[in-house]
Image (cartoon, rainbow, N blue to C red):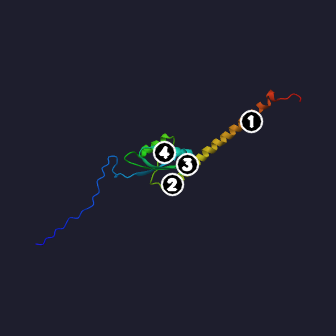
Amino acid sequence: MNSTMTQPKRRHVQPLDINPDRRPETVSPLMVSFDVGGMTCAACQTRIQRALDQEPGVIKASVNLMLKSAEVTYDPVTTTPDMVSQAITRTGYEAAIHPSDQADHDEQAQRDDKQAKEFTSFRNKAIVSGILGLLAMVLSMPLMNGNPAHQQDGI
């Protein structure tokens, strides 16, 4: 009998990576957007950016001054959107989770309304400050004329 035996094919088996420090990668990072209120300058933006970067579970954060928003990529095992929102609030700014189903034109209309209200508020404050400054200057002028140290006798 002529029997030929075939050898089983060997498969390349990679060793199992047993590292206790490494988490299973079954949970993918999530992204959430926030509307940030009260942010008026680059220093505000930097302060919020630093707070988000130091927050546990935040993988990536991007704060936009012009849009007054923040986009945060986070690990859902470690943190939640509410915890990220609290981190922004702790820095002294308002944070609201951005509704994802809202249309872009509605967003722009809301931003325009908010910006118009801010402009009106700043304009009113400037007008009141100008009036009070002018009033203070006018009321102080008679006091300068009545000061005996400034009067000269017959020179």
- Residue 13 in percent (x, y) is at 27, 58
Whole-angstrom CA distance, mark 2 to mark 1, is 48 Å
Given contact means CB atoms under 8 Å apart, are the residues at marks 3 and 1 in contact?
A: no
Q: CA distance from mark 4 to mark 3?
A: 15 Å
Q: Quadrant of the C terminus?
A: top right
Q: Please name whichever residue, 9 or 104, is drawn nearer the observer in this view of the structure.
A: 9
| Residue corresponding to mark 3 | 114
Residue 138: which quarter of the image?
top right
Q: At numbered mark 2, what does the secondary structure look like: helix, strand or loop?
A: helix
Q: Are marks 2 and 4 in contact (CB under 8 Å)?
A: no
* Mark 2 Cα-neighbour bin, 10 Å: few <14, some 14–19, many ≥20: few
Marks 2 and 4, Cα distance to the nearest angstrom? 19 Å
Instruction: Looking at this view, name the residue that lies furthest to the left.
Output: 1
**In this picture, residue 23 sits left or right of residue 149:** left
Label 2 sits on residue: 106
Whether the residues at callouts 1 and 4 have beta carbons within 8 Å, the answer is no
Q: 59 and 121: which one is in front?
A: 59
Q: Which residue is mark 4?
A: 95
Distance in Å between CA atoms under marks 1 and 4: 44 Å
Residues at marks 2 and 3, CA–CA distance in whole angstroms? 12 Å
Q: Amino acid at mark 4?
A: Ala
Quadrant of the frame with the N terminus: bottom left
Q: Amino acid at mark 2?
A: Asp
Q: Secondary structure at mark 4?
A: strand
For the image shown, how many numbered marks are present on the structure? 4
Residue 138 disc label: 1
The mark nearer the N terminus, 1 or 4, is: 4
